[in-house]
Image (tube, grey):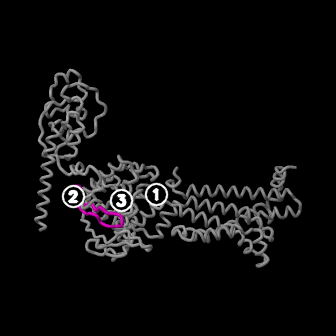
């Protein structure tokens, strides 16, 4: 029995394609967790990163927070939060957001810092308001790096959202957790494959967004 | 500018009690070694740096009295590396300030296209992005962008320092031409004294510590530097460079044998002087070697030496002298604007012209003193 056989067996079993434990439903849940966590993390990380990067202050405090965030183990945090807050969405969201904020925050800050200062000086000298400088001069140039931060955050969330299943929520982690418990390795491998594919799809999505959103003048192609 | 001082919190004084009257519709150049406060001075005019003491008046009104963005939008600003927005096309870069002032997109783009032509940019570049342009082209875009909303004042901070000497010369000539057409009040910062002398109507030489060493028209700067600092900063060849300000129009031309450089040996042996007005005089740029009295040593010349002929009236005495020195015979060949030979002039004649020009200059100075007295 090799892995490919497991994969084949899992995906060809029609029982896996419908119902509340079917692949579409679990995939939907997983995407939903991912989007929620990513939006929350972006809502926290982007504004702070943009503003600190624009003014060039608070870089040290930021890297401290980011390192601390990275040092927290997601699984440990999940168990801790569940014991503190009980079962539900919130104890799952907290570790995912804590996981995703540092890459967004740090790359956004670094992206804004790495913008060539001379167009900013020119913009200020021609009487542009600070907010306009941020959004119309710095952000378009910093965008590729900012997107790469969001991308790595998104991929980390996709792979880590599997832990939601440990606290009796859904998502693709369900297959892995249940499969291990039932010693049904076909299910484990199938779930893991789905997570990997979803991560690759996320990667492709970000590539497409960058193609559309980043100016050809910045892409230099 | 009235007694303007900029002191930083750490106690460094960048500009020290500087008073300067910048004339309307002319180019004023601030020049000096690095760290002399010239850029700080410029940046105080559009309040990128706020002065610690003193006031800056624009047309009699304190610049502190209007909102900073309004002030800046009434002044074009050009910086060293052009500072173009790399995510915007050339035409949108130029249209930035008009768009900020609320112009419609069509109107702003039409204006941008007009300016591209004015600064000598090919219309085909409009849809390109900055990275697709050379440094010199980018700098032209920078100038066009600063002129877009037709501001009366133009601030230029070492705009041509980052391009190579040939491109720089082109940009300088272009700036002088644009200035002839538009008549802006330009404040220009550079560390290059030759650039200052070439462009400036008035030149302010500054020294480290933010002091004004001398404020004078370039010819006066060369003829009578205020102190040894200014003299050192001006560098060597002060006398030669000053000749740029003497016209060559009054040079007396004589006719002499003038032979194209690609003449055959027979032609040289039996020289038939080109009559003044001969169309073949176009070739005179290459004639110096052949014009040797003994007629020997002739070789088919390579490309013409640039500026090997002088156009009296248009060129300065410096060009005339340069031609005479470059010529193996010591004679400069004069041509008219179409490149036809009009005559020749010797080093001696040029020397006399220089002496009389100096004498005239001294008379002017004496007259000035009388008026002042």
Q: Which residue is mark 3?
A: B33
Residue A92's disc is none
Could you tell which of marks 1 and 2 lies nearer the N-terminus?
1
Task: Residue B88: give x, y in percent of width and height.
Answer: 46, 57
- Number of numbered discs on residues: 3
User: If you read the primary sequence from the N terminus, does the residue marked by circle 3 or circle 1 appear first?
Assistant: 3
Question: Label 1 vs label 2: CA separation?
Answer: 48 Å
- Say whether marks 1 and 2 touch (CB < 8 Å): no
Dot 3: what SS? loop
Residue B211, percent from left and from top: 32, 67
Furthest residue toward right: A183
Residue drawn at (12%, 46%), measured in percent from left and top?
A: B250
- In the picture, measured across the screen, residue B211 lies left or right of residue A95, that is left
Q: Quadrant of residue B99?
A: bottom left
Q: What span is colored magenta in the figure? A: B202-223
Q: Crowdedness of circle 2 by 10 Å Cα count: few (<14), some, many (20+)?
A: few
Percent position of residue B236, x then y: 28, 50
Q: Which secondary structure lies at badge 2?
A: loop
User: Label 3 to label 1, Cα distance in Å?
Assistant: 35 Å
Q: Which residue was labeled with disc 2? A: B224
């Amino acid at each position: 029995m090799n892995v490919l056989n497991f994969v084949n067996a899992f995906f060809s079993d029609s029982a896996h394609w419908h119902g509340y434990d079917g692949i579409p439903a679990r995939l939907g849940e997983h995407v939903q967790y991912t989007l929620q966590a990513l939006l929350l993390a972006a809502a926290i990380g982007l504004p702070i990163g943009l503003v600190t990067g624009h003014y060039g202050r608070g870089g040290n405090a930021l890297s401290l927070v980011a390192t601390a965030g990275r040092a927290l183990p997601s699984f440990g945090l999940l168990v801790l939060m569940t014991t503190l807050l009980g079962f539900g969405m919130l104890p799952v969201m907290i570790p995912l957001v804590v996981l995703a904020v540092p890459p967004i925050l740090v790359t956004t800050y670094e992206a804004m810092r790495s913008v060539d200062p001379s167009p900013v000086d020119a913009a200020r000298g021609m009487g542009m308001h600070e907010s306009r400088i941020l959004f119309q001069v710095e952000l378009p140039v910093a965008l590729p790096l900012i997107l790469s931060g969001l991308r790595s955050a998104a991929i980390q969330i996709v792979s880590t959202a599997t832990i939601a299943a440990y606290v009796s929520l859904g998502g693709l982690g369900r297959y892995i957790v249940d499969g291990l418990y039932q010693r049904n390795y076909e299910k484990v491998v199938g779930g893991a494959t789905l997570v990997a594919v979803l991560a690759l799809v996320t990667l492709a999505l970000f590539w497409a967004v960058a193609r559309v959103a980043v100016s050809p003048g910045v892409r230099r192609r | 500018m009235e007694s303007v001082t900029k002191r930083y919190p750490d106690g460094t004084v960048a500009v020290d009690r500087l008073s300067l009257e910048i004339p309307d519709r002319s180019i004023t150049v601030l020049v000096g070694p690095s760290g002399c406060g010239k850029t700080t001075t410029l940046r105080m005019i559009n309040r990128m740096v706020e002065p610690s003491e003193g006031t800056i008046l624009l047309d009699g009104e304190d610049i502190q009295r209007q909102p900073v963005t309004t002030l800046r939008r009434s002044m074009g600003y050009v910086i060293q590396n052009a500072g173009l927005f790399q995510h915007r096309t050339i035409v949108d870069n130029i249209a930035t300030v008009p768009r900020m002032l609320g112009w419609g997109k069509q109107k702003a783009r039409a204006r941008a296209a007009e300016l591209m032509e004015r600064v000598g940019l090919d219309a085909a570049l409009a849809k390109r992005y900055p990275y697709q342009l050379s440094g010199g082209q980018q700098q032209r875009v920078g100038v066009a962008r600063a002129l877009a909303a037709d501001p009366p004042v133009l601030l230029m901070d070492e705009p041509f320092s980052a391009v190579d000497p040939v491109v720089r010369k082109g940009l300088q000539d272009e700036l002088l031409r644009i200035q002839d057409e538009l008549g802006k009040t330009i404040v220009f910062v550079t560390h290059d004294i030759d650039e200052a002398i070439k462009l400036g109507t008035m030149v302010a030489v500054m020294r480290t510590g933010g002091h004004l060493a001398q404020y004078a028209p370039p010819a006066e700067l060369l003829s009578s530097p205020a102190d040894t600092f200014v003299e050192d900063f001006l560098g060597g060849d002060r006398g030669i460079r000053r000749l740029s300000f003497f016209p060559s129009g009054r040079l007396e031309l004589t006719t002499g044998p003038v032979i194209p450089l690609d003449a055959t040996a027979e032609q040289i042996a039996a020289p038939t002087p080109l009559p003044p007005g001969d169309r073949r005089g176009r070739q005179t740029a290459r004639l110096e070697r052949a014009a040797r009295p003994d007629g020997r040593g002739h070789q088919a010349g390579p490309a013409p030496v640039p500026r090997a002929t002088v156009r009296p009236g248009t060129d300065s005495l410096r060009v005339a002298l340069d031609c005479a020195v470059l010529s193996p015979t010591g004679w400069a060949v004069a041509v008219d604007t179409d490149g036809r030979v009009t005559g020749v002039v010797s080093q001696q004649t040029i020397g006399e012209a220089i002496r009389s020009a100096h004498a005239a200059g001294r008379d002017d100075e004496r007259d000035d003193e009388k008026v002042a007295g």
